[in-house]
Image (cartoon, helix red, strand yellow):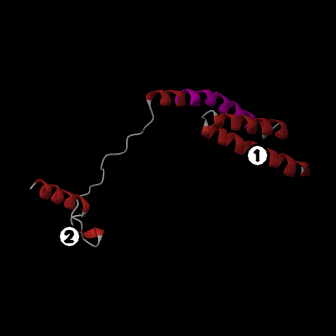
Amino acid sequence: MEDEKHTEVRKDLQSPNTDVDIPDYPSEYREETAAEIAAPVPLVGKRDREENRERAEGGTGMGWAALVLSILSLFVMPILFGAAGIVLGFLARRRGAEGLGAWAIGIGVISIIVGIFILPFF
């Protein structure tokens, strides 16, 4: 009798249950799914936010200096002050002052182009 029980258990373990009807298409599954409604929570910690704020504050002064040099280059020594404004603009962008750095770079490039190609004709 014990041998019969062991053989029944072994038969169940060896052969899969084929009596279950598995649907052919995934759309036939009766599963309930839902989308998340809440906005995702940022994974930035408090310390990271403080470091970014300090980084942006450090670049703001450099960004203003770059912008002043670039604007000054429109009137006086465009190649020298324009190049300095561009370099400081890149440094300001790296330190977190994205907007000020971009404006300083743009105005510095325009000043150098005007100084090299247009001012010699006047």
Q: Please give left or right for residue 100 compared with residue 1 in the image.
A: right
| Label 2: which secondary element | loop
Depth check: 11 or 18 in front? 11
Residue at image mark 2:
21
In which quadrant is the N terminus drawn? bottom left
Name the mark nearer the viewer: 2 or 1: 2
Residue 40: x and y, percent? Answer: 37, 44
Return the residue found at the far bottom: 24
> Is residue 115 something that shows in the picture?
yes
**Which circle's residue, 2 or 1, is located before the other in the chain?**
2
| Residue 43 against residue 110 in the figure, above or below | above
Q: Position of residue 55 (x, y in %)?
A: 58, 29
What's the residue at 69%, 34% (across, down)?
91
Which disc is residue 9 wearing? none
Q: Which stretch did the figure color magenta?
A: 53-70
**Is residue 66 magenta-colored?**
yes
Q: How many marks?
A: 2
Three-letter amino acid code at the position of disc 1: Val
Q: Name the quadrant containing residue 7.
A: bottom left
7 lies above or below 23: above
Majority SS type along the magenta span: helix
Q: Nearer the viewer, residue 81 or 37?
A: 37
Question: Residue at 18% across / 69% down in the picture?
Answer: 19
Residue 45 colored magenta? Answer: no
Q: Position of residue 18 (x, y in %)?
A: 21, 68
Left or right, 96 with reference to 37: right
Q: Which residue is labeled 1 in the image?
A: 109
Q: Residues within 10 Å of mark 2 (few under 14, many from 20)?
A: few
Q: Amino acid at mark 2?
A: Asp
Q: Quadrant of residue 106?
A: top right
